[in-house]
Structures are given as structure tokens and as C-alpha cells.
Image (cartoon, coloured by chain):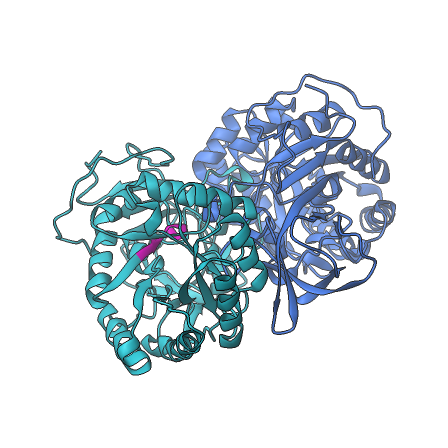
Chain colours: A blue, B cyan
Amino acid sequence: MTSTLPIVRQPVDRRGSTEVTPTLATPRLELDVSVAVDRFVRLAAALPGTGVHYAVKANPHPRLLAELAAVGCRFDVASPAEVRAAVRAGADPASLVYSNPVKRRDHVAEATALGVRLFVVDSLPETVKLAEAAPGCQVLSRLSTSGEGSDWPLSRKYGCSPEEAVRILLTADRLGLEVAGLSFHVGSQQRDPEAWAAPIVSAARVFALLRDNGLSPWLLDLGGGFPASYDGGCPPVTAYGEAIDRRLDDAFGDHRPETIVEPGRGIVGDAGTLVSTVIGVVHRGGVRWVFLDAGVFTGLVETLDEAIRYRLQTTARGAETGPCVLAGPTCDSADVLYEQQMVQLPLDLAEGDEVRLQSAGAYTTCYSSVGFNGFAPLPTRITGPVAGVS
Amino acid sequence: MTSTLPIVRQPVDRRGSTEVTPTLATPRLELDVSVAVDRFVRLAAALPGTGVHYAVKANPHPRLLAELAAVGCRFDVASPAEVRAAVRAGADPASLVYSNPVKRRDHVAEATALGVRLFVVDSLPETVKLAEAAPGCQVLSRLSTSGEGSDWPLSRKYGCSPEEAVRILLTADRLGLEVAGLSFHVGSQQRDPEAWAAPIVSAARVFALLRDNGLSPWLLDLGGGFPASYDGGCPPVTAYGEAIDRRLDDAFGDHRPETIVEPGRGIVGDAGTLVSTVIGVVHRGGVRWVFLDAGVFTGLVETLDEAIRYRLQTTARGAETGPCVLAGPTCDSADVLYEQQMVQLPLDLAEGDEVRLQSAGAYTTCYSSVGFNGFAPLPTRITGPVAGVS
């Protein structure tokens, strides 16, 4: 769908853009920035009083960042390159949250020099690193979560227990850092609005313990996880807002902290369509294999283990559909998108037909390989109401 | 190990190179081209009379291609970009094998215009495509194999049955194409030299059926699969040569065709070392997590499902080792290298220590993302005896 919101126009910096304006060659990502702006506005409305920080890693296209900055969106960054991209888009570096919990020391120093103030950690060594490389900065400690209900769970790699978070933040205070509070992440493409409930309860307990120790934590980063419209559907964003608001009230009462969220997929997922062309249809042992000119190495990494299931549209006209395996164009055996759970596509689908993967704006262009098999990285074509803005 | 072979010097075209000469920043791939040349010479010696076509997709570095071409190596390509890279390196386009079984039609035409003659197919539609886009070209039909014994099996995506191969090649002949013969691939990093036995028997049967139909197939492409020296070891290349020679004799007798192989990993795997730096060591629930500045999105895609296990060296000095999870630097939960089967690393390993992943020359730089999380793609630094050649 296309937003009808009035867009605030601003000069856009195109450095670093990989836009393909004149050509309609495939594969390409068509990015309608107005849809991302619409998703930002809806999420902000569903979470009143909560700061929305778009996760740049999901899609760092400069036009997207500039349009989001122009309507008041803030940013979540993971590296100095993302800090610079956000600043070029118009962001105040002091408004950024640097949420990568384990960072290169030189990156911490570089981000600090660029004006970043707020960092996430989830261990004592990282806290010491911050004290040394970003003295006096603000610190969030990241709690681990179960990841249940999410299509792309994050539980193993990052996060600490509530007890460890207390220890980390008391240490941060002793090392002269500003204890901002906590963060957590319920897992990407989270289909259950109640997934925030348990970590909010844990967070309230940690906040109380910190107050008992004389600290004044003031910020809770509720992370990302807000879904895009993939196959299988998801609740409306208002359901997330209501569930989170109720849980915050229940857990914090009069001590409710400032809150922020870090949506990536929930803002840019629905804004993109990956347009590919069928390069071959082959039958192997009675199974139809459809080969596209886009695959795992040109942006569709999230189909690995068939975790993310994009909705498909085609230019084939036949009403009758049947199952098929969907595969990418490289010689690599891993370059198969959907095989265990085949997709339904028209039986008359043939070489030259387009297959459009819907809601593919997040984690595609940025996941693309530099050129495996000699195939170029996935380019972006800006479409929609703001396409003419320069 | 470093080769002591005399290297034939040739001017090297550096277009497209991502070399990082002056800096020793990590992560980087150190590529000793003399080792790749040594592996080519050993493989050619182990398979006398068999043409060796290096699979450009494994690592397309221009210096590597030029040095291989200079010592008589030929190339296996998957796209027009790889054709051009091979030709720039000094290859005769008519000597290339274009082995991607399902190709974009415009790529077939472009490769033909560049002088490519020999293409692989595995279906009737692709055969018709060749007849239309590359009239009169030479055709190999690819047989499916079991993939057993390989660390990165290829069995599902490509290949046809012997009966289909006969039908495909008879059709190719009727469409005015030159029936060259068959190809197959036993799976990448194949640890069993006898894996070639069954497909060679199938190929001999297809060749006999084609001769019965009045055709004169003359070429058998034995594919790749020759291993690099990862953790777990593998037989010497001479064992592969002996097993393949014996099976060819047994199956073909007096009708032995010309043969070629398509090694990628077997030539460039051992020539590369991925040098990374520890950015953090964290204990999570009693488990040690070591975070590197290189990960799945900076070249280490083959660690997904922990399929390829690189041997590790570190600058940590302690003799005592213990298990740990090895993780990459991006915020992504998928960016974990080894967790189910942890690696053994020194207990005193700390931030700033180097971790060198051995035999990482294949499928690393080319798999690298364009810049996920704002981290640059994996660069190459040429090392070894030919480092000074320009």
C-alpha cells in the first residue's frame, strides 16, 4: 500500500546511494520511502511518548534515512559508518543509540568523536571498554530474552541476566559512566505483542534494585521486533502499542521510565519489493523448480532455513497454481529460497515472467554479497510519491 | 605451506582488485597466490591428461587468475563478469567451461559474444535456450549425484538422471548443437576419493547410449570437490587422482573420453588466511563467547550450519585451552560461527589478540556482504613470493 501522508521535503544527500534510476533491469529492490514514513508515523502513534529509532542496519539507503529524519525519526546504529550515514541524513549524533552490544574499541572511540553519547553493553568487559574509550558516556545494559514467537530469534548471542545487569550498571556508575537503564530485544519479526511482557517485568525489577543502590535509571529501550507483512500475517501495530503500554503501567507504575524502540523491519520491510525475473523452469523428479535471477547471494539471505517467507506476485496470467521450489541463480547449492515448504505459483509461469517478493525492504540490499558468481549486488530503485525529490 | 615452484611472471591486470597493500588492518584475507599455483600443479600432476579449470567463483581476485593462467590453468565460469575476468587474466574464451546449469538468456548471448563455446545444461528448456541464444555451441549435460561424503553437498539443486541426459543430448544434437558429453559434481569439500566412482559408471553408460544413437561424445567434466585443509583433514590429492583414473579405466576402457575438472576450493582454499581480531570475550551462563571482527557477513558464510570448520591459530600465548563459542561482529543473531560444536582456544585469549582462520581462500571475499551493519567487505592482501609482482 502507498501512504497518502504529506511528506516534509528536505534536500537529500545521495552519497553512498546505489540507486538505479533509468533502468528497470532485474533483480532490483523497489523502495517506496513514503511507505516507510507511513510505518514510522503509525508506530509513533501506537506508542505515544516513546522515541522511535529506526535501525539503520535494516536498510541504510540515504534517501530513506533523510526522509525519516525529516519527519522526526531518530536512529539506532551499529558502527561508525552507520553513525555517519545517520548524521548525513540530518540526525543529531547525541540522539543516536549505538546498540551493538560487543563493539570494536576503535569504533567506540570513533563514534564518540562523532558525538554519540548512548551505548548498549551486556557484559563487564564491554563496560570497562566504554569507560576507557568513551569516558562519561550513557550506558544501557541489554537483558536476554527467550525469543519465543519470533521468526528470526536473537536469544543466544546477546543479553545478560537481571542480576548481571545490576552488576554491570553498578560498575558503570563506579567507572564514571551515566547509568541510563536497560535494553532488550524480543526477536525480529515478533508475531506476539505479549512477548514484551516478561522482559518488561524483569526490567522493572532491575530498575528498582538500581534505585535501591542510589542510582536513577531513566531509559528503557524496548528494542525492535515489530513485524513486516510477510506470508502468515501479523497483528496490527496498535496491538503492540496497547500491550506494551499496559505492561509498562503494570510493571513500573509511578516509576515509568522514558522509552524508545528500535524498529528496522517494522518500518522499511513493507516499503520494498524485490523484483526478479524467472530465468528457468525445470522439472526434477516430478518437482517443479523455478529459478529466479535473485537469490540468497543477491539479498535473500533471510530465506535461509526458510525463516522469512515473502509474499509473491507474478506476471504469469494463469489462475491455476501448483507447488514449486524457488531457487536463486548462482551455482551454489545453498542458493535455494524455499524447498522444504514449497511455494504456490501459477502453472504457466515461464522464463521471462516477473516474480515480485513483497515486503522485502529490510535486510536485502544490505545483506547482498559483493558479487558472488559475478552477479552484481542488489540495486535500489526509488519509487512512489517521493521518487522525484532530489 | 608456501610453494617453492618457480613462478612464470606476467603483467597482471589489477582492475577490479580490492587489494589492501599498505595496511594490516583486520579483518583481511591474506592470499598467497604461490600456494594456489602449487595446488594447481599438484592437481594437474595427480590427474595427468585432465584439463584443470579453476572455478572463478571461489575467489575471483585478478592477481590469482593471472598467475594461474600464466602456468596453464584454465577456468570454469558462471557469468559474463567471470568470463571477462578470465579473459583479462589471459584465458582464451574458447577454453572456458560455462558451468552454471540454469542461466539468464542474456548472459548466454553475452558469453557467446565474448567467445565462450562450451556450456553446461541439465534440462530440456535450458537446451532450447542454448540453441536460441548460443547457436552451434558445445553442450555438456550435468548428471545428478548423491553428494555423500561432502561437507557442502550439492545434490538437490542441479543435475538430471542418465535417461534425461540422453534425451537432453539427443535434443541438443537435433537443435544443431555439438554434443560434447557430460558433467557432474560430487559435492564441495568431498572427503571420499571414491565418490567419483558411481557417477563415472553412470557417465560411461550414457556415453555408450549416445554412441548407439550415432553421436560421438568426447568430453567428461569430473567437476570439483577437491578439498582444502580444513579441520578434520582429508586424503592427499594423489589419492583422488588414482581413484578417478582407475574408475575411468574400469568404466570406459577403450572409449575413455577427454576429461576436465573444476576445482575451486582445492586450488585457492589453502592459499588464504582470514586474519581477524578479538573484539570481546564474554561469559554467558558459564559459556565463553569470543567475538571476532570478522563474521558471517564479512566472508564466513560457509560456517552456517557449521558446515566448514576452519583451523584456527591465535596470538594468545597460554598453552591451556578451553571451549568457546565463536561469533561475528554484527548485531545479527545469525552471525555466529561455531556454537553447536565449540572451538578450543587459549584460555588467556583476550581483546586485541589475532585469530587466524586457516585455508580460508575460497568462498570468503566473494561471499562477503556489501557492508551489513556498516562493516566494509572483506579486503584481500597479497602475500608470499609473488607479492612484489605488479
Is A235 on the left-hand or right-hand side of B385? right
Q: Residue at x 66, y 33 (%)?
A: A381
Asked if residue B54 lies in the magenta stretch, the reply is yes
Q: Nearer the viewer, residue B84 or B231?
A: B84
**Residue found at the very far bottom of the displayed protein:** B250
Q: Position of residue A253 (x, y in %)?
A: 84, 46
Q: Is residue A150 above or below residue B149?
A: above
Q: Nearer the viewer, residue A156 or B282?
A: A156
User: Can residue A102 be seen here?
Assistant: no
User: Can residue A130 be seen here?
Assistant: yes
Q: Please tell me in which quadrant of the rendered image residue B139 appears.
A: bottom left
The residues colored magenta run B53-58
Q: Residue at x 35, y 72 (%)?
A: B191
Q: Residue at x 52, y 76 (%)?
A: B163
Q: Position of residue A149 (x, y in %)?
A: 74, 60
Q: Nearer the viewer, residue A366 or B179?
A: B179
Is B385 on the left-hand or right-hand side of A135? left
Task: Name the image quarter holding the N terminus of chain B.
Answer: bottom left
Count the labels in the image: 0
Q: Residue at x 20, y 38 (%)?
A: B10
Is A338 on the left-hand or right-hand side of B102? right
Q: Position of residue B296 (x, y in %)?
A: 49, 52
Asked if residue B370 lies in the magenta stretch, the reply is no
Q: Is residue A324 above or below residue B201?
A: above
Q: Position of residue A347 (x, y in %)?
A: 75, 61
